[in-house]
Amino acid sequence: MTIKRVLHWQPNVGTSVNSQILNEVSQCVESINGVKEGRWKATLTFYKPMLRDQSLASEFPRDFLGIMVPECPNKYFFVIRTQRIVLEADSTIQTIMEKLQSYKMRVALNFEGFQYQLGDFQLRVGKVVPTHSENLRGIVMEVEYLPISSIEKSRQIMEEFLEIWQEALSKRTLPGHFMPMEPNFIEYGLSDHYSSQHTAVQYATVMAQLIASVQSVQSMRN
């Protein structure tokens, strides 16, 4: 039984993410008695179709994502946000895709950092970096409430916890804030009972927001 919210760091206008912000956020978790338990890592991969006829490119989704989350090492999740599709497969599907040469990896990103225990909550704070690179692309936080798996029943206590967290973080006057977002899970055919498919959809949504943030910063500079 568990439920999660995945949040991303939204920098203030004219600022960007950096490792100092990540350090401050981690220190803030410890200041509210979060106990560090170890490292965690999730991976998100953008795929593109292997086409012999490029004129068919428009028939394939541009946002075809594969996601691996640490609580399900033997599973692999696919999300197509534009069509509101989420699928769960055995992790060996990645090898099958490589052999079939139907899709190939365009870019892969790691979400990695530290996990903390805080009463009935687990917090995971981490950086978003391309694989084989330390180029910081964003900061994410997972908030997991352990006793309940109903989204509706946990909503109030989750909101109250996030308010306490945002208040604690605001005392550090950092140039930005964590954006709480909740996709419309019903559109993906998901129920009120939380599952790892819900987590995969949240990561896909967060990734879309991170890309939008980067693009808005670049357009302002131009």
Image (spheres, rainbow, N blue to C red):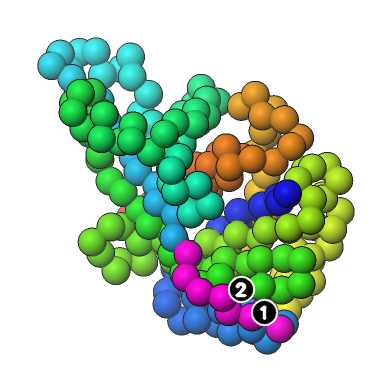
The numbered mark at residue 116 is: 2
- The percent coordinates of residue 117 (x first, y second) are 66, 73
Q: Which is nearer the eye, 150 or 21? A: 150
Indicate the quadrant where residue 24 lies: bottom right
In the image, what residue occupies the spot 24% across and 13% down?
Answer: 56
Q: Is residue 25 visible?
A: no
Which residue does the numbered mark 1 point to in the structure image? 34
On whether residue 156 falls in the magenta region, the answer is no
Query: Secondary structure under badge 2?
Result: strand
Q: As displayed, is residue 116 above or below residue 216? A: below
In the image, what residue occupies the spot 37% across and 24% down?
Answer: 61
First in sequence: mark 1 or mark 2? 1
Q: Which is nearer the eye, 73 or 123? A: 73
What's the magenta region? 33-40
The numbered mark at residue 140 is: none
- The percent coordinates of residue 185 (x first, y second) are 67, 33
- The percent coordinates of residue 162 (x first, y second) are 75, 64
- The percent coordinates of residue 206 (x first, y second) are 53, 49
In this picture, residue 38 sits left or right of residue 94: right
